[in-house]
Amino acid sequence: MIDKVINEVAKNIDKFCENKEKEYTIYTEKFEQGLKKPCFFIYCKNYDDKLFRGKRYKVSVEVCVEFVPEDEKATNKEVNEILQGLYNATDMIDVDGNLINGIDKNVENTKGGILFNVKYEYFYYRQEEKEEMEKLKEKIYF
């Protein structure tokens, strides 16, 4: 389920970037060599899965979106535009037909870019696998 949340965030950011004059690359896996800037790294920062009630569980997935500009001297206008786009793109995601709101959004400006954190919380039911009994054949003797 974590991968589905990350992929939906990536899709929304990709839609935001379609109308931009620059081409942005989105990475959801670790990538070190041949990095194409400007780019986004999207990964799970924290994950929590707790029993809520009965067989109902509450999941909390905190996603970090790291933006790396083309050069370290990116203008404030460019950075602010990306920030606003990230807020809009992470507002709501669709996972398996269920809409999930992004909450607890916060931004940290770093020397090499931006760290944007957003949390998604949802519930699910855990189904227990039932072991079926073996079929018995009855023999009748007269």
Image (cartoon, helix red, strand yellow):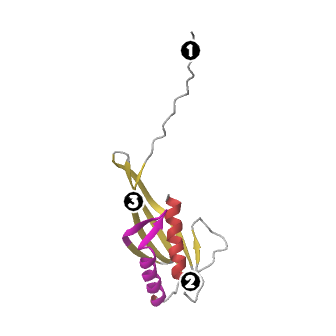
Q: Position of residue 65 (x, y in %)?
A: 48, 71
User: Taking 104 as reference, is 30 left or right?
Assistant: right
Disc on res. 20:
none
Which residue lies most toward the right here? 34
The magenta segment is 77-105
> Is residue 11 shown in magenta?
no
Label 3 and label 2: CA atoms lie apart by 29 Å
- Mark 3 or mark 1, which has the lower sequence index? 3
Q: Position of residue 64 (x, y in %)?
A: 46, 68
Disc 1 residue type?
Ile
Residue at image position (49%, 40%) is 129
Image height check: is 127 above or below 74? above
Image height check: is 9 above or below 38? above
Q: Position of residue 45 (x, y in %)?
A: 46, 62
> Is residue 86 shown in magenta?
yes
Between 117 and 102, the residue placed more toward the observer is 102
- Mark 1 or mark 2, which has the lower sequence index? 2
In the rendered image, which residue does mark 2 sit on?
A: 18
Disc on res. 122:
3
Label 1 and label 2: CA atoms lie apart by 74 Å
Residue at image position (48%, 78%) is 111
